[in-house]
Amino acid sequence: MEPILSCHWQNPDGEWALTVSRNGGSWELSASAPRWSESLPFEGPDDVRRLAQALLDLPCEPEPYECEWQLSRTEFASTDKERTHFATFALGLDPTDGHRPYLAYQSYYHTGQATGLGLEVICENPPVDHLRAQAHAFLTNLPAGRPPQQRP
């Protein structure tokens, strides 16, 4: 899986990452923490295009802005071991912290009657210019995609 959009950072606990890449015929978001990582699929390339466009549209000035995606995968469907792994991925400007940019991932697991927390990965102050360059390259090179629209 070659990354298409990626954000890596380090803190005292270790290395963290949020990466979008193609895995066979699907697009996946991989969330990595120092001791755990997981990946979930996007619904399709249009969701990845929307993510790339949302990065290009991320305002430079402080204003309310958030885009969100719901990702999920069901394992062992229709059996007594059925388990659904789902997550929310968001990017935006934090209105409670001076409209600082962020990327946030929170996953959950649902089995039978129980739902439990999974992995949480939050990138505060991501490298916005780098992510915009990746998003522009992605939208320019993805077949059947519309040309990227840069925000003024």
Image (spheres, rainbow, N blue to C red):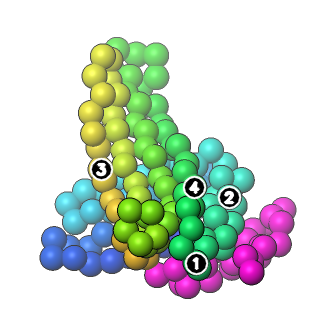
| Image: magenta residue range | 127-152
Query: Where residue 61 is drawn, which disc sits there?
Result: 1
In this view of the protein, which residue sits in the foreground, 106 or 14?
A: 106
Q: Is residue 58 above or below residue 36?
A: below
Q: Is residue 129 magenta?
A: yes
Nearest to viewer (mark 3 / mark 1): 1
Residue 58 is left or right of residue 112, and the answer is right
The tag earlier along the polypeptide, 3 or 2, is 2
The residue that mark 2 highlights is: 50
Quadrant of res 45:
bottom right
Q: CA distance from mark 2 to mark 4?
A: 9 Å
| Label 3 sits on residue | 119
Q: Is residue 47 magenta?
A: no
Judge from the rendering whether residue 146 lies leftward or rightward of residue 56; answer left or right.
Answer: right
Specify the label residue 67 is tagged with: 4
Q: Position of residue 107 (x, y in %)?
A: 36, 44
Q: CA distance from mark 3 to mark 2?
A: 23 Å
Residue 28 pos. (x, y %): 53, 55
Residue type marked 3: Leu
The amino acid marked with disc number 1 is Glu
Can residue 23 be seen in the rendering of this structure? Answer: no
Which residue lies at the image location 22% right of the left edge and 76% below the top edge? 11
Given residues 102 and 97, the one toward you in this image is: 97
Q: Are marks 3 and 4 in contact (CB under 8 Å)?
A: no
Q: Between marks 4 and 1, how big is the CA–CA gap? A: 16 Å
Q: At x 49% / y 55%, what residue is drawn?
A: 90
Q: Nearer the viewer, mark 3 or mark 4?
A: 4
Tag 4 and tag 1, C-beta contact below 8 Å: no
